[in-house]
Amino acid sequence: MSSRDVGESMEGRGGEINERRETKMKGCQLSFKRQIAFRSGLTLVELLLVSGIITLLAGICWIAYTSVKEKALLIICRNNFHQIYLAVQKYRDDYDGIDPNGRPLSWSEVGLPYPFMTGLIRDGYIKAGSPILHCPIGERVLKAKLEEIERHMGRRLDLIIISSYGYPANLPPHNPSKQIAEHFSQCVVQKRSQVAILGDHWHNPPRPPEAPPIPTPLFPQWELVLRLDGQVDWVLVTDGKACR
Ligand SMILES: [Zn+2]
């Protein structure tokens, strides 16, 4: 065998090897591509599953979070009422308290000057601007409204008191004051200290868990009230005239 022959046979073998290599490579590429296709398919399913689970968990957490937050706001609100009641009690102690004597009382006889919140603040029983004068929800809403008005007017407004607590919805809430005073006095005579003196309509639950069974309401809206005896109750707003 000459050296030329050897060279040729070497070339021939080299070509064979190269061909084999190429086929192998092609095979590898194909199986790799298949693998990718297979893997990406799985990943997509996994991804959908994971995102589904995350959405579900987020939903559950959000519901739990909002209900915890609502409960916390309600606790703050009830505590505000308790603080206001302590101020009312102090006022009544200082001004001979309430005793209906079988006849309608005036606001001053009851120990709560009209409007009594202003009286409590004016006479120093509650600090002006104290956070206990506001439902945490109501305060937020009122602040937003005030900002809107300020934007509209283009200047800052100096409001000393924005009270988010008011007269209970079924005590006549507007002037004339004589009408309210008479109505309030009659309520006190009828129901003594069971009468509601302060109302908060910001929570409005469909039905509070501790609510007593009640007849069909005209306006199915719950209001949290502070009674003259310091009790805090859920009350259904009815016809705006009831003495509750
Ligand atoms: Zn409240």
Image (cartoon, rainbow, N blue to C red):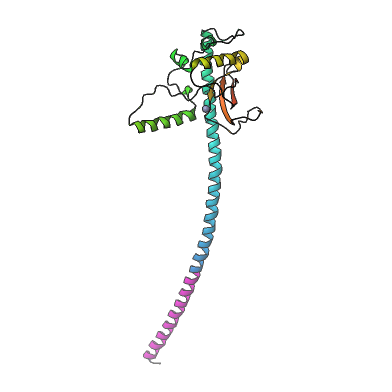
Q: What type of secondary structure mainly makes up the magenta span? A: helix
- Give the residue furthest to the left: 154
- Is 34 above or below relative to 87? below
**Left or right position of 199 against 215:** left
**Left or right position of 62 against 151:** right
- Give the residue furthest to the bottom: 1
Find residue 21 and report its image quarter.
Answer: bottom left
Tell me where the magenta segment starts and ends, as one range.
3-31
Image point 56% across, 47% down: which residue? 56
Q: Is residue 50 magenta?
A: no
> Residue 29 at x, y = what percent?
47, 71
- Residues 31 and 122: in front is 122
- Is 84 above or below relative to 40? above
> Residue 170 at x, y = what percent?
56, 23
- Residues 185 and 28: in front is 185
Image point 34% across, 31% down: which residue? 153
Say which quadrant the N terminus sits in. Answer: bottom left
Say which quadrant the C terminus sits in. Answer: top right
How many numbered tags mark residues here? 0
